Image: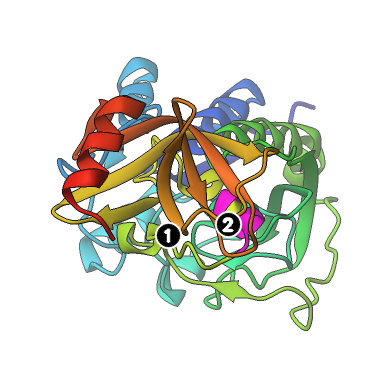
Amino acid sequence: MTQPRKRAVVFAYHNVGVRCLKVLLAGGVDVALVITHQDSATENIWFESVLSLCETEGIPYLTPEDAKGADLLAAIQAAQPDLMFSFYFRHMLPQAILDVAPAYNMHGSLLPAYRGRAPTNWAVLHGAKETGATLHEMTVKPDAGAIVAQQAVPILPDDTAFEVFGKVTVAAELALYDVLPSLLAGTAPRIPNDLTQGGYFGGRKPEDGRIDWSKPAQEVYNLHRAVAPPYPGAFTDVGPRRYVIERARLFNGNVQGLAQGLTVVDNAILGVCGDGRALVIHSLLADGLRISPAELRAQLQENPT
């Protein structure tokens, strides 16, 4: 006898939301309702749209301002889900929603490491060698529930957070795809999430990308990698101008005797750091416009530090 399809309510946004929602659909899940976000006019939208996917697939969706409204709770209850999923939804779900049906969240790290906000960016910033995606049971405390599935991916030495996020998106798709049959059958594993390990990290703001040139070059490079475009970018201010690093690598040449900060040597832009090493900056933005080494030299002469 054929078992009835499982019904799900899905909270989703961003690339991970799109890919994981497609996994549910491919796995025969009846997605009764999707809760997503309207794109913000103040944000650089470089990712796929859950809202567009819902319109293509004919899935009902809502875009509430937050997750605490009585109308939203009523809509979720009316959908009568067997399961609920959260895939990069940006609001915390209150206990009243979590009480409706078993709920699972996809987090962009190998829990318990890098719990909280912006896990990919934090992993790159801290020089981690790997990260991944974790599907876990949802609780009111974020990223604290039992682990259901994980998929690791490497972080290569020159990977930016944008590149790593692409890998994490694939890791999330694979993790959900592999565990979905057992999840629907009620036989998925439940691995304790050891909260004595790892730690919580908060959201990141553009100002967090300010460069301290007294830091070692590897630390400055990790900052660049963690916030390189399409994120806001690592930046430094010289006089009235803001310079944002678009592309850079660690520099292997000699920078002894050069002052910390931006400089131009042999027609190359360098960022000299506190340990006597430097970044070679292949693309630098000045007030949003790409600048040449000659233009930077002239501007630095106008505003000597």
- Residue lying at 66% horizontally and 73% vertically, measured from the top left: 144
Circle 2: residue type: Pro
Is 141 drawn above or below residue 118 in the view shown? below
Q: On the rendered image, what quadrant is the N terminus found in? A: top right
Is 193 magenta? The answer is no
Find numbered disc 1 in the image and state the secondary structure of the residue it sits on: loop
Q: Position of residue 249 (x, y in %)?
A: 60, 36
Residue under pointer 2: 119
Q: Mark 2 or mark 1, which has the lower sequence index?
A: 2
Residue sitting at the far top: 56
Q: Secondary structure at mark 2?
A: helix
Residue 219 among those drawn in magenta = yes
What type of secondary structure mainly makes up the magenta span? helix
Q: Nearer the viewer's eye, disc 2 or disc 1? A: 1
Q: Is residue 33 left or right of residue 30?
A: left
Quarter of the figure with residue 38: top left
* Residue at x-position 78% and y-position 55%: 148
- The quarter of the image holding the C terminus is bottom left
Q: Amino acid at mark 1?
A: Ile
- Residue that badge 1 annotates: 211
Say which residue appears at 32% left-offset and 57% top-offset: 206
Residue 107's quadrant in the figure? bottom right
Identify the magenta region.
216-221
State the count of labels: 2
How far apart, in angstroms, are the residues tagged by discs 2 and 1?
A: 20 Å
Judging depth in this view, the residue of 12 and 127 nearest the camera is 127
Q: Position of residue 292 (x, y in %)?
A: 32, 24
Residue 105 in sight from this viewpoint: no
- Displayed quadrant of residue 220: bottom right
Q: Residues within 10 Å of mark 2 (few under 14, many from 20)?
A: many
